[in-house]
Structure formats: structure tokens, C-alpha cells
Image (cartoon, helix red, strand yellow):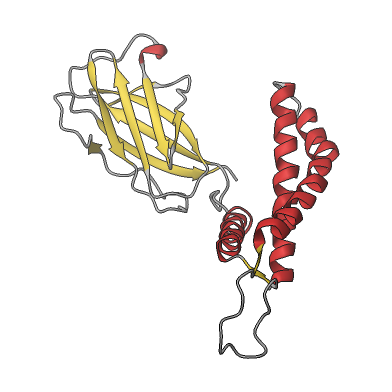
Amino acid sequence: MRIILGILSGLLGALAGWSGLAALVVMLAGPDRDGGIAMGAFFDIGPIGGVVGLIAGVWLFVRFGLVRNTAPAPAGEIPDAAPPGASRLSFPFAVTVLLVVAGLGYRGWYELIRSPNLSHGFMTLQVEFRLPPGMTLPDKEEDVHIEVEEASGYANAMLPPNWRAHDGDRKAIISTVSLMYKTRHRAVSLTLPDVPTQRWSIDLPSDPDPTPGFSPWRTGSEPSPARIEMHFRLSADR
């Protein structure tokens, strides 16, 4: 167990030193459009931090991971018990190392095996909004603000050239946005001039397949006089 914890402590130190030094170089270098600085920082400079971190991790294990028994052996203790001065593992240090390793292992499994990205890759969500009878469309594209929530992130939907549409005698707005993450939390909101912001949930599985067509029209989750309706469909980019 001591050998295993010592190796894990050294590897954690190497990982922290490698990534930390590379991140510091990228931060000090400033914006990098082509990614050359980031690549150089990770592959050329990062290993230096990895070596330093490896040494630091082993030193921390020897310094804090091993605790020496300084108390004299009590009377009646079994003969083969550890003598005074013998070292033993530090329980808090061992637990900390194992928890960090478990957290990194879970993150690696989530990113590399389970993957947070949709199985179909980037998918296009097409959303249409149908205004109530008598309501006119905004004159400018800048007056239409459509925001899509996906997991903990937000994306502004794009308006195509033919974003102004109609459904019978009712005006409509067409927009699209790309989805890429597995999540059960998706929602879309629409903000128009002098109209309360409307919000709808997007009822899709966490890792959805393309939908066969548009969903039924639905009203906003928050009741308002706007009476704007929304429906959507999802298609794969490949």
C-alpha cells in the first residue's frame, strides 16, 4: 500500500506540475489564435513542470504520508508489534490521495469513454415561433433575441435570411442553433421589443436522435398576454 500511494502521489504531482506550468505559460503569453503557444506550452514546457511535480509529490508522500510512531510500546503489547520509531501511513493523506485519484478517474471516464458530447456530434435544432393574430414582426433582426440553454451553457440562436415567415394569417420567426452536449436540461427563450420574455422547455432525451418532424405547438411555460407559440425539430449534421 505504501508503494502504491507513493506512486500515486508522485503521478498526481507530475500531472499537477505539467498542467499547471503549461496553463501558466498560456496565461502569461496571452491570446493565441492558431494554438501554437498552447501546443508548445503543453508538449515542450509542460514536461519540466511534470518532473518538478513528480519530485514534489514523492517528497510530500515521504513528509506527510508517513507518520512515525514515537510513543513507547504499552505494557502487554504483542512482541511483533511495530517498535517505536517505525513509520505508518497517514490516514488523512491516504484518503486525500485516493479521493483525488477517484475524482480524476471519474472525470477521465466521463470525458473519454462516456463522453459529454452527443453521439451524433453537432446537431441542428430548428425552432419556430408563431405570433398571436394581429401581432407584427420586428423590423430589424437585432430586435429579436433567442437564447437556448443547454446543460449549464447558453447559446444565441441564429436567424437565417428567411427568418421572417408566416403560418396562415399569423406571423412567425424561424431560427436555428447547434446542440452538442448530453443533458436533460434544454430550454429556449424569446425576447421581442415591448413583449415579456417567453420561455419553453425542449423535451428531448439526454442523447437524442433526430426527430421525425416538428413537435406540436406549445405556449410559454410562464403565462403571459403574449400568447406566442413554439415548436421545434432536431436534425443531425452528419
| Left or right: residue 157 compared with residue 20 | left
Image quadrant in which the N terminus is located: bottom right
Looking at the picture, tell me which residue is in the foreground, 16 or 127. 16
Q: Position of residue 225 (x, y in %)?
A: 14, 24
Q: At 80% across and 45% down in the image, what residue appears? A: 52
Q: At 64% across and 68% down in the image, what residue appears? A: 70
Q: At 47% across and 25% down in the image, what residue appears? A: 158
Residue 171 occupies which quadrant of the picture? top left
Q: In this picture, is 57 found above or below 65?
A: above
Q: At 23% across and 18% down in the image, what residue appears? A: 195
Looking at the picture, tell me which residue is in the foreground, 21 or 210. 21
Q: In this picture, is 145 found above or below 103?
A: above
| Left or right: residue 15 compared with residue 36 | left
Q: In this picture, is 195 found above or below 62?
A: above
Residue 224 occupies which quadrant of the picture? top left
Picture mark count? 0
Looking at the picture, tell me which residue is in the foreground, 131 or 49. 49
Evaluate whether residue 30 shows in this view: yes
Q: Position of residue 94 (x, y in %)?
A: 60, 64
Q: Position of residue 161 (x, y in %)?
A: 48, 19
